[in-house]
Image: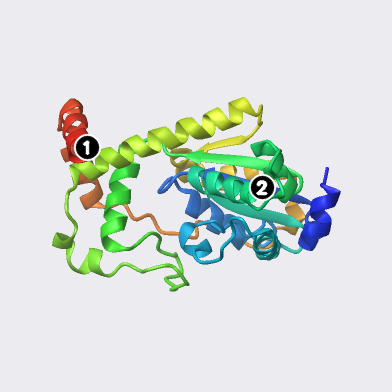
Amino acid sequence: MKNSMMMNLIPNQNKIQTSYIVCSTGRSGSTLLCRTLEHLKCCGNPEEYFHHKRIKGLKLKDNPENFINYCNKILQEGLTSNGVFGIKLHYWQMYDLIKMAKGSGLFKEKEDLNILNAIFPDLKFIYIKREDIIAQAVSTTIALQTGVWQVRNENQNQEGIKTQTKSTSNKSFIKFQPLKIYSWEEKFKDQNQRWLRFFEENNIKYYPLTYEILINSFETEIENIINFLDIEQNLIHNKIEKQNKRQSNEINQRFIRNYKMLPKLLLKVVNKVVNA
């Protein structure tokens, strides 16, 4: 049920029939999923609207007007003409969103899930994770070095997206960073546990998905998600196809092999000393 008070504060809520959050971690396949849903033109436009770089300088905390105005803006941007809104949130982005919502003074006494439901009408959750967390961590360390986070199939440069340049022209630029891989592996484990705890504590029924299943059963999984969101199939006019290229290559595989040869206890101890 839509919150009448919030509908008055955020006019674009009136246009939304259903909304969903893609709950994710970095390098989990969430960008591939979201770009594909966006391409279908009837599944919302799920972006990282609360990425720290996007909201930097907007002064959303402790400023109700700024917060409401930004929510109204993203509800318009993330909406397709059939009334479906989508957003992607990593766990800490959701945490920051809820913190800002409470800081605005509008939701001081509300529980976390109630805040999300108040902002995003008729909310559903899609949870995507990666089974191979080591591969996820390796991919993250490489992306941080190259600046390449996604590559479109149509090879088009878009805002916020860097194409493959340094990583392909000079492979020696990419360094094997076992301590950073270990750190990201632990971070992803922690974030996945936090997502699952959030779902369990709030008794949320969500659509579960892994990167591996998405890659191997792509069309089937996209169709399942469309059904989960109760979107009419006749609204889909674009072909279901992968919008991003797979970036894993021999460098990823070599780093994964090298990392697995290192004693995990040693990595844990050294990482603790370095970060003491």
Labelled pair 2, 1 in contact (Cβ < 8 Å): no
Distance of label 2 from label 1 (alpha carbons): 40 Å
Question: Mark 2 belongs to which amino acid?
Answer: Tyr
Q: Which residue occupies 28% across, 40% down?
A: 183
Image position, residue 72 (x, y; %): 71, 62
Residue 244: image location, x then y, percent: 45, 59
Residue 154 appears in view? yes
Q: Determine which residue is flagged by label 2.
A: 20
Nearer to me, 111 or 261: 111
Return the residue at label 1.
Answer: 276
Q: On the rendered structure, is 35 left or right of 101?
A: left
Viewer-proximal residue among 187 and 152: 187
- Residue at 64% across, 38% down: 112
> What sort of colour scheme is used for the picture?
rainbow
Image quadrant in which you'd find residue 240: bottom right
Mark 1 lies on a secondary structure that is: loop
Left or right: 25 in relation to 183: right
Q: Callout 1, which amino acid? A: Ala
Q: Is residue 74 above or below residue 266?
A: below
Can residue 231 be seen?
A: no
Q: Is residue 15 left or right of residue 33?
A: right
